[in-house]
Amino acid sequence: MILADTNIMVDYFRSRNSDLAVKVDSLSIALCGPVRAEILHGARTNEEIDDFLTAFKTFENLPTDDYDWEGTGFLLNTLRSNGIQVPLADAFIAFTAMKYDIPLWTKDSHFKFIQGYYPELKLYEQ
C-alpha cells in the first residue's frame, strides 16, 4: 500500500488516460483525510465534487484520530524548533504515512525536509 499525496491525485484526476493514471490504477493506493479535503477544496463544480467522492471509494481510506493530531503537533514542533516550516496538511500526511508504516508518493519537497528529521518517513520512488 502507498499513501498518495494531493499533488499525485490532482494529476491523476486531471489525466485519467495518462501513464500516471495507469500506474495509480495498478497500485494499492491509500488516501487520508487531508488529501481528500485538499482535493475537494480544489473542485470547481458540484459535479466535480460528486466525481471525487465517488472516486475516493476506490482507494483505501486511512483512518485518523486524536493521536494523529497530537503526533502531527509534535512533528511540527520538532521541525519549527529546527527552523523548518511546513504546511499543517503536509505534516499530517507525513505523520499518517509513518503511523501506517507505508511509503508516501509525492512531488512536494516539504517531505524531504520532514524525512531529514524523521527518517522513518518512507518516500515512494517512481
Image: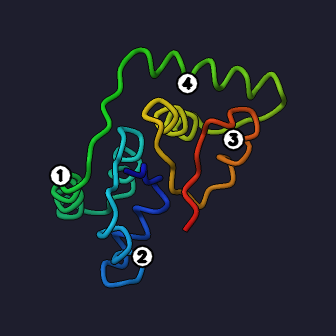
List the residue tagged with mark 3: 115
Q: Rounded to the nearest whole Å, what is the CA distance between mark 1 and mark 2?
A: 19 Å
On screen, residue 81 above or below 31: above
The one nearer the camera, 96 or 10, is 96
| Residue name at image x 47 percent, y 52 percent | 5
Location of mark 1 (residue): 57
Which residue lies at the image location 29% right of the left edge and 69% below the top edge? 25
Cα separation between marks 3 and 1: 29 Å
Query: Looking at the figure, which quarter contains the C terminus?
Result: bottom right
Labelled disc at residue 6 = none
Q: In this image, 16 relative to 74: left or right?
A: left
User: Gap between marks 3 and 4, in whole Å?
Assistant: 14 Å
Which amino acid is tagged 1? Answer: Lys
Marks 4 and 2 sit apart, C-alpha to C-alpha, by: 29 Å
Side of 82 relative to 58 (left or right): right
Which comes sooner in the sequence, label 3 or label 4?
Answer: 4
Disc ID at residue 72 = 4
Q: Is residue 16 above or below residue 102?
A: below
The earlier-in-sequence mark between 3 and 2 is 2
Residue 32 x, y percent position in the rendering: 36, 41
Position of residue 62 relative to residue 52, above or below, is above
**Three-letter amino acid code of the residue under disc 2:** Leu
Q: Nearer the viewer, residue 124 or 84?
A: 124
| Secondary structure of the residue carrying numbered label 4 | helix
